[in-house]
Image: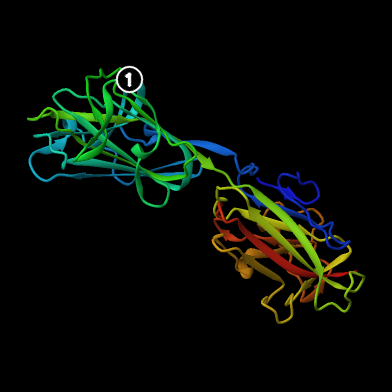
Amino acid sequence: MIAISFLRLPARIARFNSFAPFCAAAAVLVALAAWAPPASAQVSGTVDWATLGIVDENVIPSGTTQASVGVTSTITWSMATDGGSFVAYSGNDFVSYESSAQGGFTGFAQVGFDNSSEDADDRITLNVAFSEAVTDVEFTLTDIDQSSWDDFVEVFYDVGAGWVNAKTGAFTTFVGPAAAVDNEAFGDGWEGIGAAATASTDGNIAFDFGALEIIAIRVVYFSGNDNGGNPGGQQYGLSDIAFDKLMPNLTVSKTVVVSSLSSSSYAVPGSDVQYTITAQNLGAGRVDNNSIFLVDRLPADLTFYNGDMDGGGPATGPVYFTQAAGTGLTFTPATDLRYSNLVAPPANFAACAYVPAAGYDANVRHICLNPKGTMMGGAPTKSFSATFRAQIN
């Protein structure tokens, strides 16, 4: 669990702003996962073909999904032909799982076909889409080569602005001697130029997209035109796809001012003060859905006010929730706001079970918030605030 306390908070995680002498209250921000690392931290995931539950040499259905480190990957594929004989490779479907080894990888997605002619209009397009942007995307295409056939592949990536040909950047870390960059009228990618044995890496093309925040990759596969005639069956393998999940980096701050509704302009006994707790996500990654749990502990010298906290302002209840554009949360007081009268901080939202009386209620010791949805990351900084009112005893 992510627990952030104002009293014992590392300086790199949060800051505490004090505008009055009654700011010793603690706040706990909990997201149901592990400690949120700094913005640069990441967790590695994999699209692992062997864990899809598909029997060897059976089709990988278009629309298949897999979850890894909280990221859902969706595999889709389609076939296009303009006529003639265009069938699946060696009796399998156009895209299948293979538990054998090829190009140094054991367990891979095989994409293949048997075409009656070298027709670049007959092609298979394979997409892998991620439920959120990921970085350090790495994979290898195997057995891109040439014999009676002429393998041709195009590789694209999407960072949220449409498909971009991977040839436009330095994303290949290895191109075996059986393959080479090629640009034809019918395709712009990599083509087989020599033979590659199944166990060899000669037909491998390895990709690493580094720091790019990618939401999808695409591989388009078809025949080149170097041989002519009937190329027979041809295929390539797609290795497991490694990636890094971007992590959130949550910070919390708390400010206090004398309420405009206070009987005094100073923070003295009998005055009302207004607290604002602000949580920010300084990281590029998003917080898990419905996982934020915020607890604020009131010291004994404050009495919570259970009413319209600003008396005719934008708030209509005891806690006023706001968020920056694009933060992605919702807050419904009836279901997302609770209280506790216990001394110890509640461990979860369900443990906040006290029903406060109307007006000033000295029994309220903790204010609990559980906004719903996914708190997004990235620029501009996403944040939310909760403001409430209390009286100095």
Looking at the figure, which quarter contains the C terminus?
A: bottom right
Looking at the figure, which quarter contains the N terminus?
A: top right
In the picture of the structure, the residue carrying the numbered disc 1 is 201
Residue shown at 63% from the left, 47% from the top: 249
Residue 33 point in image, percent of width and height: 60, 45
Q: Quadrant of the rendered structure where residue 225 is?
A: top left
Residue 320 point in image, percent of width and height: 68, 70
Of residue 190 and residue 373, the one placed in the foreground of this image is 190
Report whether residue 342 is seen.
yes
Residue 184 point in image, percent of width and height: 20, 37
Report whether residue 240 is seen.
no
Tag 1: Cα neighbours inside 10 Å, few (<14), some, or many (≥20)? many
Q: Quick check: 185 above or below 281?
A: above
Q: Quick check: 68 above or below 379?
A: above
Q: Is residue 102 left or right of residue 390?
A: left
Residue shown at 56% from the left, 48% from the top: 284
Of residue 265 and residue 330, the one placed in the foreground of this image is 265
Name, please, the residue furthest toward the bottom.
Answer: 312
Q: Secondary structure at mark 1?
A: loop
Q: Quick check: 281 above or below 111?
A: below
Q: Quadrant of the rendered structure where residue 180 is?
A: top left
Q: Is residue 235 left or right of residue 330?
A: left
Q: Is residue 37 left or right of residue 297?
A: left
Number of marks present in the image shown: 1
Residue 363 point in image, percent of width and height: 82, 66
The amino acid type of the residue labelled 1 equals: Thr
Q: Is residue 280 left or right of residue 67?
A: right
Name, please, the residue furthest toward the right.
Answer: 269
Q: Quick check: 193 above or below 297?
A: above
